[in-house]
Image (tube, helix red, strand yellow):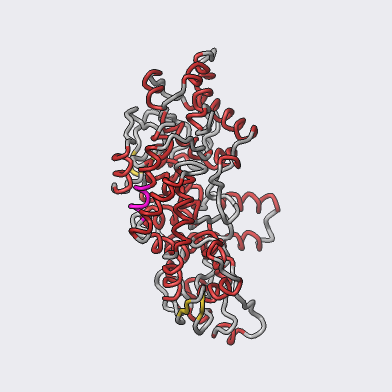
Amino acid sequence: MSFAIRVGLGIGSDFVNPQDLLDAKAQLNSQIVSVGKRTLLKRNDAPEAWPSHLTFNLDERVEACRMDRKKREEIDENQSLSLKEKNKQRNDLRRLEHRFIDRLHLAHQSIYGHDPVRQRFIHFWANHFTVGASGPSPFFIGHLIQDIIAKGITGSFDQLAYDVTRHPSMLTYLDNVYSVGENSRYARDSGKNKQIGLNDNLARELMELHTTSPSIGYTETDIREAAKILSGWGDIFDNPKTIANFKKARITDFHMAYFKDKAEPGKKTVLGKTYKNGKDALKALVHDLSATENCGNFITKKLCVHFIADSPSKDDLNYVRAAWFDTNGHLPTVHHAVLDRAHITSQPKFQWPFTWFMTVLRTFQVNLIQGFDDLHQELLSIGGEYRIEHICREIGQDFWARRQPDGFSLQSEDWISPEHLDRRVRLAAMIHDHGKPKTIDQTALVEMLKLSQSTIDLIKKAKSSRDRFILLTCSKEFIGVAS
């Protein structure tokens, strides 16, 4: 299996294998340059800088989700509109959600960007810290991926985990915006007409899925105490009163949305350690959870499973664990260690559907996905499916979809099925028919992809270029499965 496929997204647009070990590591340290293509109607246009008007900071996203809710309520309350007219206006409004732009941004960076290895690690962490499309979350997920995760993987795990935990997308997705301390000032002043109480969703997932794993032996009491620390973090970000609420609380940063009046007062004890009252307790808690041996073992194993093998060897695990514990979870060092082991392994590693799709488009320089100027336009002169959200839904992997808090499975067995293979075969056929993949020298391709003789023999038997393309892109080396 090619190293370029295992840890990157294929061979690259110039058909030079840039993803040797040193280059792979260099990509993690390079400057982030967001790129994309303007339109699918001009297939030969070169990628260019991702436009600034399609890049949104957190303030802009909060304002957008507030306006979205306001307009939806106006549509619902407009008695002069028929149900059909209301549905049309709702659909028109839905097109303005940032999820469509952000999803396209992620795909373009994967296909055209100069940092496919870094993109793969970003995808891993976007899955580890799963958020989904509930409430106003779709307006924030792109910011979490582009601004928090993409930049955060250059530092320590505990800082990344803290930044993700308090991000509006996570606070919204796991309902922490509704978590109010039962003894808080807000609870005392609200009377009986307010819903008051702790929500432990985020506290539970912080410990179970994001840091220590259940191996540390936490109790329900630990989770409840962690929920008390998290109480007061977040607001219902699309609430018409959001801006007023932040001004009243003297909060100027939506990424530091700690409302003291909603927080449970007093000290809290989690896993035997006591935390003082106040917003600093969350950072201290995340730091302490991240510093545990259980967290290091849990995270490094996930990285090895994703990039090396479903059942990584003891040597693989020990090597990456050593990098974690020697540096207190310094992610660039840990990621370099993962690449070291991925570079020498001979085990196959099954590639996610999204990873496989991006790899095919990147390797064969396929023009299939709409450009950023094509958003919400019907490209009638273009055959096949060109909307990334529809393709992601078809292959069963969309980072903006509703999903379980543990994200997409890292294990091959959960993806290998006749249905999933059939979807790849049909998508490969569409790519060939409508994407105009570049013809690549077969000898060079065999060498670069490290194709086995059995795969070469099978491809030779194909009766058409279409069949050869399908057999190649759906081969065991391209997908990452054992013989």
Question: Which residue is depicted at the point 35% across and 46% down?
Answer: 34
Q: Quadrant of residue 322?
A: bottom left
Question: Which residue is depicted at the point 50% across and 27% down?
Answer: 473
Question: Which residue is depicted at the point 38% across and 23% down?
Answer: 447
Magenta residue check for 74: no
Q: Which residues are magenta?
A: 331-337
Magenta residue check for 333: yes
In the displayed image of the protein, which residue is found farthest to the front? 314
The picture places residue 235, in percent across and down from the top left corner, at 52, 70
The dominant secondary structure in magenta is helix
Quadrant assignment for the C terminus: top right
Any part of residue 259 in sight: yes
Q: Toward the viewer: 140 or 219? A: 219
The picture places residue 431, in percent across and down from the top left corner, at 51, 28
Quadrant assignment for the N terminus: top left
Q: Toward the viewer: 303 or 100? A: 303
The picture places residue 327, in percent across and down from the top left corner, at 33, 59
The picture places residue 292, in percent across and down from the top left corner, at 44, 65
Q: Is residue 410 above or below residue 425?
A: below
Q: Is residue 144 above or below residue 10?
A: below
434 to the left or right of 364: right
Any part of residue 70 in sight: no
428 to the left or right of 292: right
Q: Toward the viewer: 401 or 286? A: 286
Q: Toward the viewer: 254 or 93? A: 254
Q: Is residue 359 above or below residue 78?
A: above
Counting labels gives: 0
